[in-house]
Amino acid sequence: MEPTVVLLGPPGSGKGTQAERLRDELSFATLSTGDLLRAARAAGTELGLRAGEFMVRGELVPDDLIIGVVGEAIALLDGTPVLLDGYPRTVTQADALARALEERGRELTAAVFIDVPDDVVVERISARGQGREDDRPETVRERLRVYHRATEPLVAYYEENGLLRRVDGVGDADAIAAEIRDAIA
Ligand code: AMP
């Protein structure tokens, strides 16, 4: 069966960067919900307008808004190795993902947790120069709070079903990419 991999980690853990590398190096199709939502906002769609209200505050977009969108996107990727960047972010999303994959005759093959401590996250995001409106320091702090409350429980969730692969996300991007490749091989 073709691999289906989730990248899990706090904001600023390098999920986006690593997802792009794996897409290029291992020919995965990547699905980044953050990119998808930013594109919807830029296009001024109904989804974008509704999601934007939450994104500017550093909050999660409600599950019912995002779950259907991801389900539709996954349905287009039958037969392709898939890497999910930034999804799931709640246990409800993780359950919905499992069901959506099952409907397509596939299942999750690994959940890679890129482990980066909060102080490194704050340093990194301030160093990348606030290009994104949600990279303002107070919004980063809110995104971290939301991460710990809503998303971090997924580490235990995927540990329980044996899918978790933990990778140290502090250090050289090439070394981290190599670790991720080993973890999903
Ligand atoms: P990201 O680019 O992954 O950091 O996502 C940017 C913002 O998009 C997040 O702070 C959330 O507001 C929203 N977002 C992205 N993915 C999700 C998701 N799976 N569930 C809810 N909100 C999301």
Image: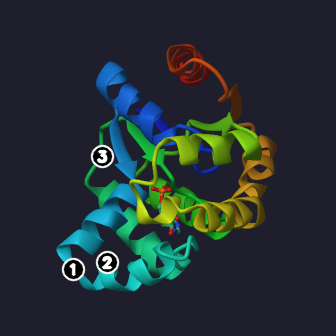
Q: Residue at x 81, y 45 (%)?
A: 160
Mark 2 = which residue? 48
Amino acid type indicated by mark 2:
Gly
- Using the image, determine if residue 131 lies above or below residue 43: above
Distance, label 2 to label 3, CA atoms, is: 26 Å
Residue 57 can be seen in this image? yes
Residue 72 location, quadrant: bottom left
Q: Residue at x 53, y 14 (%)?
A: 178
Amino acid type indicated by mark 1:
Gly
Q: Residues within 10 Å of mark 2 (few under 14, many from 20)?
A: some
Q: Residues within 10 Å of mark 3 (few under 14, many from 20)?
A: some
Is 14 displayed left or right of 48 in the figure?
A: right
Please state, as top left, top right, bottom left or bottom right, where the N terminus lies in the image: top left
Mark 3 = which residue? 78
- Using the image, determine if residue 117 lies above or below residue 150: above
What colour scheme governs how the chains and residues are painted in the rendered image of this protein?
A: rainbow
Foreground mark, 1 or 3, reads: 1
